[in-house]
Amino acid sequence: MKLKLALAVAAFALATQVSAQTKWDLPAAYPASNFHTENLVQFASDVDKATGGKLKITVHANASLFKAPEIKRAVQGGQAQIGEILLVNFENEWKIFGADGIPFLADSYDESMKLYKAQKPLLDKKLGEQGMMLLYAVPWPPQGIYTKRTLNSAADMKGLKWRAYSPATARIAELVGAQPVTVQAAELSQAMATGVVDSYMSSGSTGYDTKTYEHIKNWYDTQAWLPKNAVIVNKAAFDALDKAAQAAVLKAGAEAEARGWVMSKKVNTDMIDKLKANGMNIITPSAQLKTDMKKVGDTMLKEWLEKAGPEGQQMVDAYRKM
């Protein structure tokens, strides 16, 4: 009788423990080896420890659960409780999402942080209206141009088969006379290997992750912009957590943001060194190419402001006053 009672108590305790554990899925678009994904895994581990295992977050890397363009909708609809998105991917939905994809508006880590501070209140409001919350955001290293060609000016970019992964990268192609081809990160290596694209604009990190050096040998360090990945949470899923778990998520998120910015800076230096070691030519753009690309940036900022309206202008004004 005592044994039966003891077993019953143990079973009840186990059932209570299991029911008290909450599981979240976190879809991400980039490989497990990417610094953004490594940061997500550390964040999930921190939450696990802080909640004593009550909240388990599983990171699904490399678009294995949802493809990059699907992640925001999955979090909004509750198919995933939390996810990582590239903000510029959603500029067609709302212009402010694309603010950090405007070439040469914010062209360093310090400027990128200022832009984030100006952008964040608007992001918080919009995501809140959509039933989500912004947990944290981390920039990619500065963007440069990968190409097989020698580029002395923007005219040399005419006819390039240019990988486009956002409205901004597609628009750059149009302005310089290249042919935009939509290719997401997970398909980039294959697209280069099969000649679908022969050029694109991205960070040293993406270039190394995708072994771009096997297909393309020139990277022009234009430092055009620093697009951010944002980690977003389904608000209903967050509200369903107890106060201690909510605090743990917010604390781990703040730590992941601070850590992520440091990681991004380090990755920028490390990846450029690794690209060099694998035969990539790291090239400082000519004065003419810089001038030409700045004109592209000015055109795109003007177009962006026309579509973004008063809130976009206020955000850019706030950024420029910092």
Image (tube, helix red, strand yellow):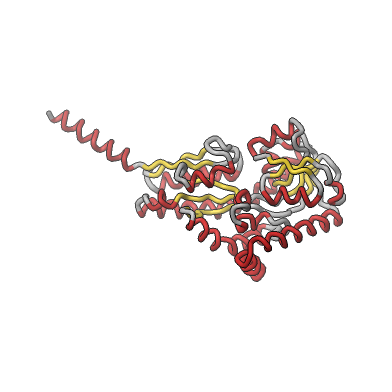
Q: Identify the residue shown where x is 75% and y is 51%.
A: 172
Quadrant showing the N terminus: top left
Q: Identify the residue shown where x is 66% and y is 35%.
A: 187
Residue 131 visible in rendering: yes
Instruction: Count the numbered circles shown.
Output: 0
Say which quarter of the image contains residue 67. Answer: top right
Using residue 238 as the reference point, say whether residue 73 is left or right of it.
right
Q: Identify the residue shown where x is 44% and y is 47%.
A: 47
Say which quarter of the image contains residue 309. Answer: bottom right
Q: Is residue 309 above or below residue 267?
A: below
Residue 254 visible in rendering: no
Residue 204 image offset from top left, x and y in percent: 70, 45
Given the current orientation, which residue lies at the most extreme left position? 1
Q: Nearer the viewer, residue 18 or 48?
A: 18
Using residue 136 as the reference point, say whether residue 165 is left or right of it.
right
Residue 311 image offset from top left, x and y in percent: 60, 65
Q: Nearer the viewer, residue 223 or 51?
A: 223
Residue 267 image offset from top left, x and y in percent: 65, 47
